Image (cartoon, grey):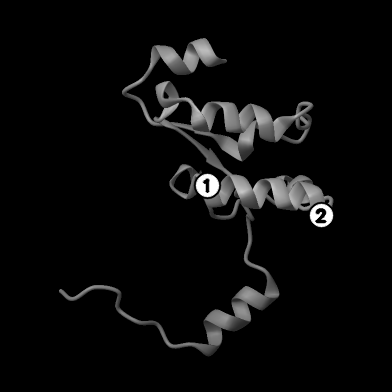
Amino acid sequence: MRSVLARHPKTAIIGAHTGMGRVVRPVQDHAAVIEAILKDPQFSHVYFDISWDEVAQYLTATPESLRVVADLINRYPDRFLFGTDKRGASEETLRLFSERPARRLSKR
């Protein structure tokens, strides 16, 4: 993987879900693998997305895993992408949006 990342230094590469998926579980020392990429100046074009509920389960599985992840995000805040992969809005989200009037975000 590192050789692929190194071959494309001018391309912003996003490691979706930090490399995890429905059938792809975290590798041993997953956080250390991610940190090695984050701290290597050769890979300054690589970012990680933590936008999936499944990822959150691994990141918050234990107090130690949460501490490790929080530490990584605090040390490399500009290298993590936040969002959601939820396909439909939850009842809570729908309620929140229905209670607040829409606002224009920019002037025309």
Q: Classify 101 as above or below 84.
A: below
Quarter of the view holding residue 26: top right
Left-right relation of 9 to 75: left
Q: Secondary structure at mark 1?
A: helix
Q: Residue 61, position in %: x, y?
A: 83, 50
The mark total stands at 2
Q: Classify 108 as above or below 98.
A: above
Q: Classify 66 as above or below 105.
A: above
What residue lies at 68% left-to-right and 35% top-to-bottom? 31
Q: Which residue is mark 2?
A: 63
Question: What type is the residue that disc 1 sits on?
Answer: Arg
Query: In this orientation, does residue 20 appear?
Result: no
Q: Which residue is mark 1?
A: 75
Q: Secondary structure at mark 2?
A: helix
Left-right relation of 49 to 44: right
Q: Residue 34, position in %: x, y?
A: 61, 31
What residue lies at 56% left-to-right and 49% top-to-bottom? 73
Q: Residue 44, position in %: x, y?
A: 40, 30
What residue lies at 41% left-to-right and 26% top-to-bottom? 41
Q: Residues within 10 Å of mark 1 (few under 14, many from 20)?
A: few
Q: In front: 83, or 64?
A: 64
Q: In front: 52, or 4?
A: 4
Q: Mark 2 or mark 1: name the one nearer the start of the chain.
A: 2
Quarter of the view holding residue 108: bottom left
Left-right relation of 6 to 82: left
